[in-house]
Amino acid sequence: MNNLNQAIWVELLKARRSMMPLLTGLGFLLVPLMGGFFMIILKDPEFARQVGLISAKAQLMAGVADWPTFMELLAQATAIGGLILFSLIGSWVFGREYSDHTIKDLLALPTPRRSIVLAKFVVIAVWSLALIVMIYVVGLVVGTAVALPAVPMDVIRQGSITLAVTAGLTIAGITPIIFFASAGRGYLPPMGVAILTIFLGQIVAVAGWGEYFPWAIPALYSQGAHFGMVSYLLVILTGIVGIVGTFIWWEKVDQTH
């Protein structure tokens, strides 16, 4: 346990000393801010004309200016943007050891490899969840600031649940992508896989098989789709496979090459 605590502390220290938390925070902060911007456009079509956007286009992108639409927008952005951003975080946490050539020094420490890997996954999960909490809180502030029509508390609660589940499904789906940060020994392979999963997810969803493709499920869920238990189990299994695969890679593969 001491080894794990120390490994987590080291990983948190690496993150704190880098620009990545700030950059990812600013990147994800655009989600509620842009959502609020679209709500303003929908509420005031004349303003949309002044800035060069027509209200019909805004309607197509966001629907009507109310809390359900705003919360759904946050969830959809989490499903798509979160997949890229969370993958970037995971790629950085694992891939930087190879890109910065610190992997040999890291493995020379008297800390079990499994503790190092687990610490990295813990940091990725905490980091990702912190971003979700941030956009949720900022989203509530933005929605209130743009004076969205009052709704029963149950509506906000349901939107919050949808956002939380979408975030959980998205985070679970990035673990196989993170595996490629280790197997590919850097940043680029996992980000390529992340882009590929988004591309394939769009195709599979259009074909009507999205409920069986782990990386399409979060986006479909955020749009109000209902799934059977099989879909959720597929996402959970995908997450487990990614974690186990990463552990095996670090334990069994020669990292000195």
Image: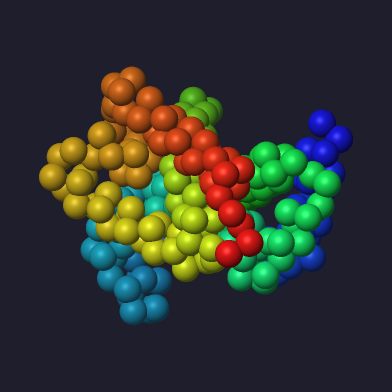
Q: Residue furthest top?
A: 229
Question: Can you say which quadrant of the picture contains the C terminus?
Answer: bottom right
Q: Is residue 84 shown above or below 220?
A: below
x%, y% of residue 73? 41, 49
Q: Is residue 19 visible?
A: yes
Residue in the picture at 16% in, 47% down: 206
Residue at image x 61%, y 57%? 255
Q: Is residue 16 above or below residue 53?
A: above
Residue reaching furthest to the left: 207
Q: Position of residue 109 (x, y in %)?
A: 81, 52
Residue 212 relative to residue 24: left or right: left
Q: Position of residue 79 (x, y in %)?
A: 42, 47
Relative to residue 116, is residue 18 depicted above or below?
below
Left or right: 23 as drawn, with respect to 219: right
Quadrant the N terminus occupies: top right
Asked whether residue 166 appears in the rendered view, the answer is no
Residue 163 or residue 125, whichever sits in front: 125
